[in-house]
Amino acid sequence: GDEMTFKIESNPSFHYPLDPIAPLIFICTGTGFAPIRGLLQKRSYFRSRGEKMGTAYLVFGSRSKKEGLFEDEIENFINEGTLTDAFKCYSREPGMKKQYTTDIMKNEKIEQVLAPIVESDDSHVYICGSAHMFEMCK
């Protein structure tokens, strides 16, 4: 095959928080779920060892429910207590208005849940997806 040149860049600030009680918000689309999944798996492991955990919310967007991206994993993380809750939206759900992660975070009910976490000094917010999504989340 052909040779290919690539570069891997790591982000030194993208790691699991040192304080497991710190409240967390994970924001991602289907393509950005992989790094979030790693953090959730680590959190799940710590929880299974009996460590106390702070709240953790996921804001997740994909094209449609039918696509089914990570639905089972997300539900398992909620059921076992790794996630406190998940807010999901779909950009191409038949018969529904397009919704993106940045849209549902403006929902009053969701904002009431997430705003105190964002305002907390010890919280961590992880955003994975397109650079456009990051800009919209600022």
Image (cartoon, rainbow, N blue to C red):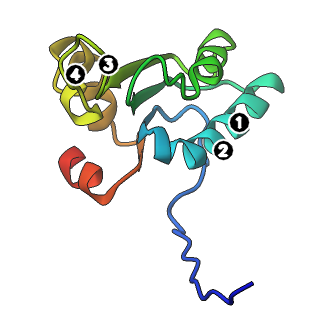
Asked whether, in this view, residue 89 is left or right of residue 103, the answer is: right
Disc 2/disc 4 C-alpha distance (Å): 25 Å
Residue named by callout 3: 93
The amino acid type found where label 1 is placed reads Gln
The amino acid type found where label 3 is placed reads Glu
Near-viewer residue (113 or 132): 132
Q: Nearer the viewer, mark 2 or mark 4?
A: 2
Q: Nearer the viewer, mark 2 or mark 3?
A: 3
Most extreme residue toward the right, as rendered? 49
| Of callouts 1 and 3, the N-terminal one | 1
Can the viewer see residue 17 in this picture?
A: no
Q: Considering the numbered disc 2 on the image, is that residue within a helix, a strand or a loop?
A: helix
Disc 1/disc 3 C-alpha distance (Å): 28 Å
Residue named by callout 2: 38
Disc 1/disc 2 C-alpha distance (Å): 5 Å
Dots 1 and 4: beta carbons under 8 Å? no
In the rendered image, residue 137, in percent from the top left (x then y), is placed at: 23, 45
Please tell me in which quadrant of the rendered image residue 40 appears: top right
The amino acid type found where label 2 is placed reads Gly
Mark number, residue 17: none
Can the viewer see residue 82 in this picture?
A: yes
Dots 2 and 4: beta carbons under 8 Å? no
Please tell me in which quadrant of the rendered image residue 65 appears: top left
Residue named by callout 1: 41
Residue visible at 69% across and 87% down in the picture? 2
Mark number, residue 111: 4
Quadrant in which the N terminus appears = bottom right
Q: Nearer the viewer, mark 3 or mark 4?
A: 3
Dots 1 and 2: beta carbons under 8 Å? yes
| Of callouts 3 and 4, the N-terminal one | 3
Q: Considering the numbered disc 3 on the image, is that residue within a helix, a strand or a loop?
A: loop
Near-viewer residue (80 or 54): 80
